[in-house]
């Protein structure tokens, strides 16, 4: 639909209409701005059967005259509505919209030109000018729309294309401002309702009461994950297998008061900072992430300093699986060089409730360090360094089942240290390699 045809005499400049007739033959000329007109579909043989131009052009002309003179709301609203209806292609064609055996279809509004009997400006350019001057919301939306820009051509495009793009930019800015205010109001209202609930003496977690009483405040995905977590905890006998903190306030002992901090809206997503009044200055307790569903805000995520609520819920769900299943899957992933497998083994080795599987996981990590040295360092250079060092200093490098060909702890340490020296590493990876070498060789 973005066909461009040029006459033998070349492209003419400075014309005030969006098509011209060349003396030797009738040729349709499209400007660079035209994206809404072009070659007719192969099966289309009859034209102007569904094209509304004959019906709507007289109506928009009348609305144009009335709106332009009186600027009355009903007349101007009709003008904008009719303009929008005339933007599509339909099967519209003018007498000269064919050349060399090809047929072309054009926006219906182009067929309004010439109905006044000639003269300048022609109808389409007049309508574009009035649309630009109108200040109503519907007029601004249409002028700033891609649909409007698609029909611009020639001098009309030169006059209004950039203005339309600027109007779209300004409208987006206004929309973001409005969304920011509404997101702040929604989150503030939630806090005003929820904090007293969190400070109450209910035997059930306040967050459970919240998703029961106000399910429409949360995304379906977050609701599902939280429901699963609460259900698993309810079935557990004498152990904690689910959340042990307030996920909306990021606390086990909520403060008396919480306030809103910075609120930012980008691409339809709102990030709202929530902070306890008695917390550390400048420190945000939790960042609530919200998205609009059906024009209403919904909490879709809660972000903490190092993790998100969804990540915590997913990890808790994974930890509720039998340890043999968790270990087997992690080992398969690691064997395929998937960093997720390395990190899961690390989690099992460090925090596993089963001493047996923690030991097995530590041994597997040692084997991976020996067989996949460079990848091991790349993966673990991204984790929290002090936590990793505590793990390594508390038996993380103690080998029980030596890799094939290794006969002693000393051999293991020397061979891994040699591999660390040969590995191509950068930045934090090099720092971790130096630390590991020192630990292995007890420098």
Image (tube, helix red, strand yellow):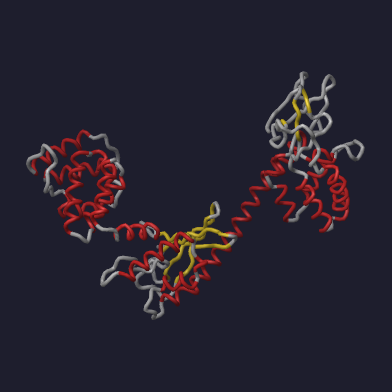
**Image position, residue 110 (x, y; %):** 80, 38
> Which quadrant holds the C terminus?
top left
Residue shown at 23% from the left, 58% from the top? 352
Q: Is residue 286 left or right of residue 117?
A: left
Examine the rendering and report whether any part of residue 293 can be seen: yes
Examine the rendering and report whether any part of residue 386 can be seen: no
Q: Is residue 369 left or right of residue 52?
A: left
> Which quadrant holds the N terminus?
top right
Residue toward you, 98 or 276: 98
Residue shown at 90% from the left, 36% from the top? 119
Residue shown at 72% from the left, 47% from the top? 143
- Say above or below: 195 vs 100: below
Residue toward you, 85 or 179: 85
Q: Number of labelled discs?
A: 0
**Image position, residue 421 (x, y; %):** 19, 35
- Say above or below: 168 vs 299: above
**Image position, residue 128 (x, y; %):** 78, 44
Q: Is residue 301 left or right of residue 76?
A: left
**Image position, residue 44 (x, y; %):** 74, 33
**Res 333 → quadrant:** top left
Extreme residue in the bottom direction = 201
């Amino acid at each position: 639909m973005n066909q461009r045809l040029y006459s033998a005499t070349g492209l003419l400049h400075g014309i005030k209409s969006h098509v011209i007739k060349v003396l030797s033959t009738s040729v349709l000329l499209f400007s660079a701005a035209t994206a809404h007109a072009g070659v007719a579909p192969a099966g289309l043989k009859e034209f102007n059967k569904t094209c509304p131009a004959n019906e709507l052009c007289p109506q928009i002309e009348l609305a144009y005259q009335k709106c332009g003179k009186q600027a009355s709301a009903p007349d101007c609203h009709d003008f904008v509505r009719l303009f929008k209806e005339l933007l599509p292609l339909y099967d519209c064609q003018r007498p000269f919209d064919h050349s060399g055996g090809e047929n072309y279809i054009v926006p219906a509004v182009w067929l309004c030109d010439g109905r006044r009997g000639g003269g300048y400006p022609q109808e389409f350019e007049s309508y574009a000018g009035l649309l630009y001057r109108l200040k109503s919301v519907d007029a601004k939306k249409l002028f700033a729309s891609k649909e409007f820009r698609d029909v611009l051509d020639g001098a009309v495009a030169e006059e209004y294309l950039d203005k339309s793009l600027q109007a779209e930019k300004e409208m987006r800015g206004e929309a973001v401002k409005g969304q920011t205010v509404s997101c702040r109001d929604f989150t503030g209202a939630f806090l005003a309702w929820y904090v007293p609930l969190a400070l109450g003496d209910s035997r059930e977690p306040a967050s459970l009461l919240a998703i029961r009483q106000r399910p429409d405040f949360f995304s379906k995905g977050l609701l599902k994950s939280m429901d699963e977590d609460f259900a698993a905890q309810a079935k557990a006998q004498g152990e904690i297998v689910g959340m042990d903190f307030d996920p909306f306030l990021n606390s086990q002992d909520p403060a008396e008061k919480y306030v809103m901090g910075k609120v930012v809206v980008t691409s339809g997503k709102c990030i709202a900072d929530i902070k306890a009044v008695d917390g550390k200055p400048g420190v945000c307790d939790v960042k609530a992430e919200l998205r609009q569903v059906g024009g209403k805000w919904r909490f879709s995520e809660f972000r903490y300093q190092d993790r998100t609520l969804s990540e915590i819920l997913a990890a808790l769900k994974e930890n509720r699986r039998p340890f043999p299943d968790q270990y087997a899957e992690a080992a398969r992933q690691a064997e395929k060089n998937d960093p997720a497998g390395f990190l899961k083994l690390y989690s099992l080795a460090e925090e596993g409730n089963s001493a047996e599987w923690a030991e097995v996981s530590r041994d597997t990590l040692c084997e991976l360090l020996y067989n996949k040295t460079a990848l091991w360092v790349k993966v673990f250079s991204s984790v929290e360094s002090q936590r990793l060092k505590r793990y390594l200093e508390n038996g993380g490098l103690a080998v029980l089942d030596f890799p094939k060909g290794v006969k002693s702890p000393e051999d293991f340490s020397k061979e891994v240290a040699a591999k660390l020296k040969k590995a191509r590493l950068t930045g934090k990876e090099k720092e971790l390699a130096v630390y590991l070498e020192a630990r292995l060789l007890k420098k």
